[in-house]
Image: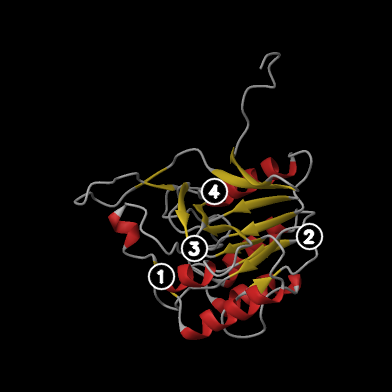
Amino acid sequence: MLIAHLSDPHLREKGHLYQGLVDSNAMFDLAMETLEALRPEPDIVIIGGDLVDEASEAEYETARHALSTLRQPVFAIPGNHDEREAFRTCLGETGSLTAAGPLHFDTGTRWPVRVIGFDVTVPGQHHGDIDDAAMLWLEQTLSEYPDQPTVILMHQPPIDIGIHFIDAYKCLRGERLAELLLRHGHIERVLCGHVHRFTQARFAGTMLMTAPSTATSIALRLAADSIPASYVEPPAFLLHHWRPGHGLLTHWVPIGNFPGPLPFF
């Protein structure tokens, strides 16, 4: 099974630039081209939040049009730049999202790896949180298929990544999630977005990863007094490859057209 994992496209209304500077729409279109050129093709596509930037109807129309080119099922969770009901309307035809409240999803047993979308966004805020209702939903959902390899997709990571100006907006009460996951031995990955960088760390007996953005990158500034900034670095997405008997392996996939293939290796 191949899972293409994109995050933080920050799509804009047609003709508008992200932050007035970057053509995030064109970058996402290039991401679609890169994804569609993969062989074998991914089985599903997951998107880890901030599908759009200002949550306008026109931006969600941009997203709907961009995603319509994909042949694969698309599963997505919202980020802090999304608006729940507009997001639900945009992605509702997938049939995977909850009908009301947080936009959790569950792919069930259709594929070898189950993907659970865990919506930890707090409407109107940039940080995430894991409240009692979210914990109850996740605990019940994880208990349904205790033997199936499972991936959890959320927007804000529940840990610090060392960049203080983005850690201020992490998912709060991550220790609650860790305690729950330690009781379940079938969690292959916790996948996040939000930080616009690829990072990985051990978490609750499994591996936590954040996906790069298809738009811009948050500056890698680890000093405690660093000034917030972003860069237009090469965009990328992650490709998670499940192989029976070997587990889940993750590739970092750059987006774009590059010289090659060349006759050497």
For discs 3 and 1, the disc positioned in front in the rendered view: 1
Q: In which quarter of the image is residue 187?
A: bottom right
Q: Where is residue 175 in the image (x, y as percent from the top left)?
A: 41, 70
Relative placement, left or right, of 48 versus 144 is left
Give the labeled residue for mark 4.
Answer: 214
Give the farthest residue toward the top. Answer: 263
Q: Considering only order in the chain, which callout, 4 or 2, is on the residue closer to the N terminus?
A: 2
Give the labeled residue for mark 3.
Answer: 53
Q: Where is residue 199 in the image (x, y as percent from the top left)?
A: 45, 48
Secondary structure of residue under mark 1:
helix
How far separated are the C-alphas under marks 1 and 2? 29 Å
Q: Residues within 10 Å of mark 4 (few under 14, many from 20)?
A: many
Give the labeled residue for mark 1.
Answer: 175
Give the labeled residue for mark 2.
Answer: 111
Secondary structure of residue under mark 2:
loop
Q: What residue type is labelled 1?
A: Glu
